[in-house]
Amino acid sequence: MSSNTGYLLLFVLLLFSGALAEKEDDEAIVETVEENTSNDIPYESPKVPDPAAVYFAEHFDNPVKFEKRWIKSKAKKEGIEEDIAKYDGVWSVEPSQKDGLPGDMGLVLKSKAKHAAISSSLFKPFVFDKKPLIVQYEVLLQDGQECGGAYLKLLSDTQENKNLNNFHDKSPYTIMFGPDKCGNDHKLHFIFKHRNPLNGSVEEKHCQKPKERLEEIFSDKLPHLYTLVIKPDNSFEVSVDKKVINSGSLLEDFVPPVNPPREIDDPNDKKPEDWDEREKIPDPDAKKPDDWDEDAPAQIIDETAVMPEGWLENEPTHIADPDAVKPADWDSDMDGEWEPPLIENPVCDTAPGCGHWEPPLINNPAFKGKWRPPLIDNPNYKGKWRPRKIPNPDFFEDTTPFKMHTVSAVGFELWSMSKDILFDNIIITDDVIVAERWASSTFDKKRQKIAKDSFLDKAVFALLIQVQNSVY
């Protein structure tokens, strides 16, 4: 319970007791209330459960260690104007603005509309071999999210990434994971880079979108836990707040797919000139009937119609406004002769109509329109033409896309139109149990505190209502 909530609860209880004591002819019993301002959910910085299984862990509770471990980028983005090319976004280590645990700090992107990049080397590189990869971290959008990302990148172990001062948008990465939003487009990225075994080219593979709705995690201003699990059998799971919202296979659920097709359309194959793709054709033997009148109109005047009784044929539908006055600055030589504006004739308000009456139009029963011969099956129909298939010269089959490029660093490279994005409790491990224990000592306690404070707030409100009812 926060101290503010505790004081308020104490005040309400005392007020409630005083109100009961003042009621006439009532014997009040006032109990002593002692406020416990201590936090019922204690917090201490999490310890790595199993160092051998952990490649990186960061709780941001120690600003001194943060300054030594994390490196703010000094690079510039390529291909944009000099004044906006710098990574000059502001990073800070600080507690959350509300509902925080005492002593719990996070990495906060303070600025908006600025490029920001920060990274840290892993304790040891993660080699994709026989153990799964688990990436887990928290995001708190304290100001919501208008447009921008809150994802992290696992940087590839390359020479280019040895100097993290130069971390930028083109720095090689192996995996990108996390939330991203702009307008009504809500995403939870899982992108991995795959190397073509034939030519060495690298291509991004994007996970198909989850079926779950993601809008709430961008708007509720609560901390959310994002977990990615990738296994050596090429399976994966993406979870939000410990609930799996997307799962599948690296081989089957990514765009473009890891492996190209075995066969492709022959680019040199051409459709024969006599190939007939028409499934139906006009009947060549059909003849237009002699009594078919193509010139008959679609609608004709209703000869049976009668002008409604009370129709005022001699009254115009509009008349000059009798209350209109010529403007004082009207110049007849410059503006022409002044005429009052027209208004609807008030006499017509109570009549079925005014002015010239014409009978309405009705559909012409003799109308047939332009004659066209009926369609029949095309005796020469050959189906839709498709080029023949040939072996794909670029075909390869990678059955182990899990074996990605080794990861040696983690970083955030972002641009956002919302400020005060808080990141916390990053862990990279090969043991799901380790990630779960890490979350239980951090994320779970945060959500417990939020739930408890929400309950107490509701209790205080209920007591206020009782006080009001007892007084009045």
Image (spheres, rainbow, N blue to C red):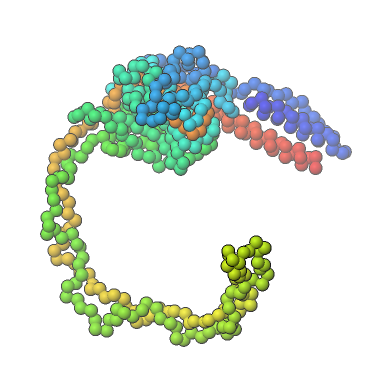
Above/below status of 325 relative to 240: below
Above/below status of 373 relative to 13: below
In percent of width and height, residue 462 lies at 69, 38
Residue at 33 percent of width and 80 percent of height? 296
Residue at 36 percent of width and 30 percent of height? 79
Place residue 348 in its image quadrant. Answer: bottom right
* Depth order, front residue of 357/154: 357
* Depth order, front residue of 433/421: 421
In which quadrant of the rendered image does the C terminus lie?
Answer: top right
Place residue 54 in its image quadrant. Answer: top left
In percent of width and height, residue 203 lies at 28, 32
- Considering every residue shown, the one lying at the far front of the view is 333
Residue at 14 percent of width and 66 percent of height? 379
In which quadrant of the rendered image does the N terminus lie?
Answer: top right
In percent of width and height, residue 453 lies at 61, 30
Let me know if residue 242 appears in the view: no
- Considering every residue shown, the one lying at the far right of the view is 25
Residue at 45 percent of width and 34 percent of height? 148
